[in-house]
Amino acid sequence: MTGRDEGARLAREELSDPVYNEAEPGLLDRIYAMAMEWLQELVRAANESVPGGWWVLGPLLALFAVLLIALIVYMRPARRARLAAVIDTGAALTAGDHRAAADRHAAAGEYGPAVRERLRAITRDLEDRAIITPRPGRTATELATEASAALPAGHEGLTAAARAFNDIAYGQRPATADDDRLLRDLDRLLRGSSPVRTGAGT
C-alpha cells in the first residue's frame, strides 16, 4: 500500500514538471489540427462520392465561381438600366396629365410618386417643345445634361432635381415636400425659358 502511494506521489511530481506543460499543444495548434482533420474528412468524402475526387470537383467549383461572378457583373448594369427607365411614362400622356397626377399625389402627401410624375411632365414638355429629342430609357442625369445644354438657366435646378430623383429612386430615400417643391419650381422655370440656339446667326 505504501509502495503504491509512493509511486503515485512520484508520478504526480513528474507530471507537474514545467516541461510537460510546455509540451502541451496551444489553442492555435489545436485549431490547426482540427481544421486539418476536417479538411482530410472533406477530401475523403469527395473522393468517395465524386468520381475522380478533387481532380474533378475542384475545376467544377472554379467554373461555378467564374459563372457566378460573370452573372453578377452582367446583371448589375441591367438592373441599373431598368431603374433608369422609370422616367418613361409607358403611356401616351401629355405633360399636363403628368402635372395633374403630380398635384394629386402631392396633395395626398405621396411625394415619391409626385416627384416621379413631375419629372415626367418636365421631360414630356421639353420633348414636345423640341428642346430635347424623345428617347425611351432616358435617365434623370441624362435629362439634366441634355436639357442644360439648351436651357443653361435651368442647369442648377435640373442637376438638383436629378440628384433628388436618383436618391429617391435608387437610394430608397423617402421623398419630402421639399423635393416636390424643387421639381415644381423647376417645372415653372423651364416652362418660361427659351432655348439657347447655337450656330451661325441670321
Image: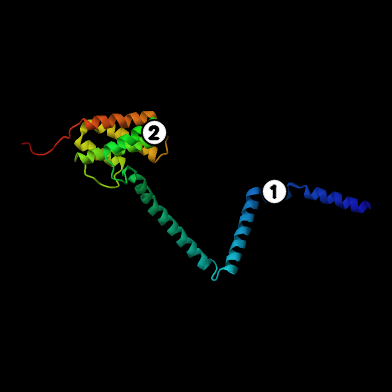
- Considering depth in this image, is 28 or 66 the residue closer to the camera? 66
Q: Residues within 10 Å of mark 1 (few under 14, many from 20)?
A: few
Task: Tell me if I can see residue 162 in this picture.
Answer: no
Q: Which residue is mark 1?
A: 22
Could you say which quadrant of the image residue 131 lies in? Answer: top left
From the viewer's perspective, tell me whether residue 29 is left or right of residue 15: left
Please state which of the two labelled residues, at mark 2 or mark 1, is closer to the viewer: 2
Q: Secondary structure at mark 1?
A: helix
Q: Position of residue 139 (x, y in %)?
A: 31, 43
From the viewer's perspective, tell me whether residue 172 is left or right of residue 195: right
Please report the residue visible at 28 percent of the width from the left and 47 percent of the height from the top: 136
Q: Position of residue 138 (x, y in %)?
A: 29, 44
- Considering depth in this image, is 112 or 103 the residue closer to the camera? 103
Task: Tell me if I can see residue 125 in this picture.
Answer: yes
| Marking on residue 111 | 2
| Marking on residue 70 | none
Q: Amino acid at mark 1?
A: Glu
What residue occupies the far left of the structure in this picture? 202
- Considering depth in this image, is 75 or 194 the residue closer to the camera? 194
Could you say which quadrant of the image residue 154 lies in? Answer: top left
Please report the residue visible at 72 percent of the width from the left and 48 percent of the height from the top: 21
Q: Secondary structure at mark 2?
A: helix
Q: Amino acid at mark 2?
A: Tyr
Image: 3 above or below 157 = below
From the viewer's perspective, tell me whether residue 42 is left or right of residue 182: right
Q: Residues within 10 Å of mark 2 (few under 14, many from 20)?
A: many
Q: Position of residue 101 (x, y in %)?
A: 34, 36
Q: Position of residue 166 (x, y in %)?
A: 36, 39
Tell me the CA gap for discs 2 and 1. Answer: 70 Å
